[in-house]
Amino acid sequence: MNTMEDKATAAATGASATERFRTDKSGATDTPPERVSMLAREVLDAVHDVIRRHQVTYPEYDALKAWLIQVGADGEWPLFLDVFVEHVVEEVANAAREGSKGTIEGPFYAPGAPRLGADATLPMREGEKGTPLVFHGQVRSVDGQALGGATVDIWHCDDDGYYAQFAPGLPEWNLRGRITADGDGRFWIRTIQPAPYQIPTDGATGALIRAANWHAWRPAHLHMKVSAPGYQVITTQLYFPGDPHNDDDIAMAVKPELMLDPRPAADGRGADVEYDYVLDPA
Ligand code: MBD
Ligand code: FE
């Protein structure tokens, strides 16, 4: 990946995210024509309504067309949709769950990360920049049973806000790993604290953000998918208190239940944080 250019440009990041989506999620669907018709009709009706209410002009219509073309050219449909739309899809999908809160997956998950034991250090470069973080917890079922052997598939950006496989120059699995919990469902993950993330500003999504005078920030976050046989996988994120963007995440994916409570580490180096997961039966 990142064959296009040797820099973390929107086009290179977008091409990687688009390629990843095509590989992992075919997009094929058996949605019946009646439902396609209803959804397409109502989306178009909503667009027509906005045009009438705001008296949209031909120059504005052409600006929209040019922008939509550029989102595709930059490969930024995964980024744009995950930032501005996915949070509502997740809300609908997980409304009935009793266990841990989910939130959006975003465009930067890569399946097949290295498998690690219950007391794990994520793959990282020698002298990886950033505040050391020990993240530990337990995976249980909604009825309180410890889920021995559960999997915590975790990924996060580095101290500069870059995700391995979506920015050039990073080892393939940097700050990504699949941890197998011990017999009591417990895990320990040694890593560094991720930096706040600014979505690429040099592509079409960045152009919209600038044109609208919005900001491009997501608060610092850890991503994970937590699973165990017989239980629903939960895709979620965890956040750090005090981040200036916890209250105005551009992706609207922060929930109070997902806020960590880090403590200074016992050895005085970095932070120690505990978070337990609760899985719903499949
Ligand atoms: C991210 O890191 C992210 O988590 C989301 C949802 C969108 C863009 C970048
Ligand atoms: Fe992210």
Image (cartoon, helix red, strand yellow):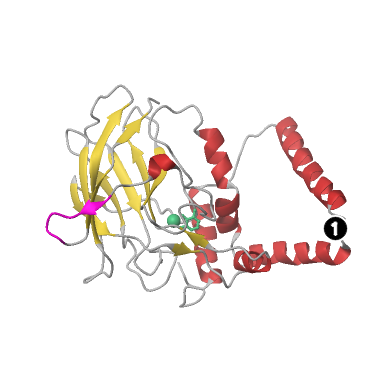
Residue 122 shows in this picture: no
Residue reaching furthest left?
Answer: 267
Label 1, on which residue?
Answer: 56
Q: Position of residue 112 (x, y in %)?
A: 35, 51
Magenta part of the protein: which range?
A: 262-268
Taking the magenta stretch, the answer to whether it contains residue 236 is: no
- Taking the spot 41% from the left edge, 66% from the top edge, the residue there is 161
- Taking the spot 41% from the left edge, 27% from the top edge, the residue there is 98
Residue 214 shows in this picture: yes
Q: Position of residue 7 (x, y in %)?
A: 47, 77
Q: Position of residue 50 (x, y in %)?
A: 80, 49
Looking at the image, residue 257 lies above or below residue 208: above
Residue reaching furthest bottom?
Answer: 6
- Taking the spot 83% from the left edge, 45% from the top edge, the residue there is 49
Taking the magenta stretch, the answer to whether it contains residue 266 is: yes
Left/right placement of residue 26 relative to residue 146 reads: right
Does the magenta stretch mainly form a helix, a strand or a loop? Answer: loop
Q: Dividing the image into 4 quarters, which one contains the C terminus? A: top left
> Residue 256 or 10: which is nearer the viewer?
256
Left/right placement of residue 65 relative to residue 152 reads: right
Quarter of the figure with residue 208: bottom right
Label 1 environment density (alpha carbons within 10 Å; few <14, some 14–19, many ≥20): few
Q: Position of residue 264 (x, y in %)?
A: 20, 55
Residue type of the residue flagged with mark 1: Val
Residue reaching furthest top?
Answer: 143
Query: Dot 1 lies on which element?
Result: loop
Quarter of the figure with residue 220: bottom left
Looking at the image, residue 32 lies above or below residue 271: above
Q: Dividing the image into 4 quarters, which one contains the N terminus? A: bottom left
